[in-house]
Amino acid sequence: MVNHRIFRNLFIFIIILSILLWKFTQLSSVDDEKKRVIILGGLIDINGKSGKVNVGSRLKDLDDTYSTTIDGSKEIGKSTDKISVSFSNGAFQFTSTTGQKELKWQYQGGSPGSPSIAEAGGNLVLDFHKLEGTNCKVQLPDGISSIVKGISGKIVISKPRSSLDIQLDNGQIAIAPEANLQYKYQVQIKHGYSDNFVSSTSSKAVEIKINLTNGYINKENF
């Protein structure tokens, strides 16, 4: 009787494990024509045509409206040589400013409070991890390299003028190059697709590094 129960439980376990493996591998797909990336049987659903990102539930987008708006800024000191922006989930738009040594941001979202900001060893860190569902517009000062790290969401880069290192686990990354500048691209993507980015060989080219795990990377003109 005991052996019968062991074999029965083992059989049930194997069936359940087989179903889970089928669900989270066979249903993972990349559809280039529809510009859609589905991971883990639909747990992560990134729709390129609609521009929407779902990770369990739909994440916020740049055109969403919110009840809370907070503006902030930080003057860039002489010792600052790098800016780091990090977040858990949300939509972020980055633009470049010229002639201003100041980091600016406008945060919108459902969570109260402000992002944390700190500086150490010349690295100025703007952290949005405690603010869920963030919608934020960030102005990066010209002449300073920046790193952007996020877990899930949408990152829009408009006319970058300084080197950027973009790292995102799930979602969309859109880049609109400055027409009068040359760029050197380094693009890595694990699951999904990317537009073609042609790099310049000029020593003055602005370096753009992109590392995306799940989703799509596209070139825009805006």
Image: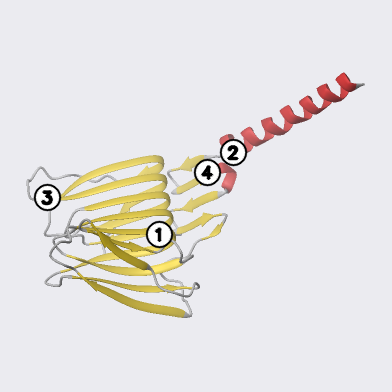
Three-letter amino acid code at the position of disc 1: Phe
Residue 110 in picture, x, y percent from top left = 50, 73
Which label belongs to residue 87? 1
- The secondary element bearing badge 2 is classed as helix
Task: Out of 9 and 137, give the one closest to the viewer.
Answer: 9
In the rendered image, which residue does mark 2 sit on? Answer: 24
- Quadrant of the image occupied by residue 186: top left
Left or right of 19 on screen, residue 181: left
- Give the quadrant of the N terminus: top right
Q: Nearer the viewer, mark 1 or mark 4?
A: 1
Q: Quadrant of residue 106?
A: bottom left
Q: Mark 2 vs mark 4: which is more N-terminal? A: 2
SS for tag 4?
strand
Helix, strand or loop under label 3: loop
Q: Earlier in the sequence, mark 1 or mark 4?
A: 4
Which percent across, then down, holds residue 207?
18, 49
Comparing 78 with 27, the one in front is 78
Q: In the image, what residue type sits under mark 2?
A: Phe
Q: Left of 5 or right of it: where is 205?
A: left
Residue occupied by mark 4: 39
Q: Is residue 114 left or right of residue 143?
A: right
Mark 3 lies on residue: 205
> Is residue 93 depicted above or below 204 in this figure?
below
Q: Are marks 3 and 2 in contact (CB under 8 Å)?
A: no
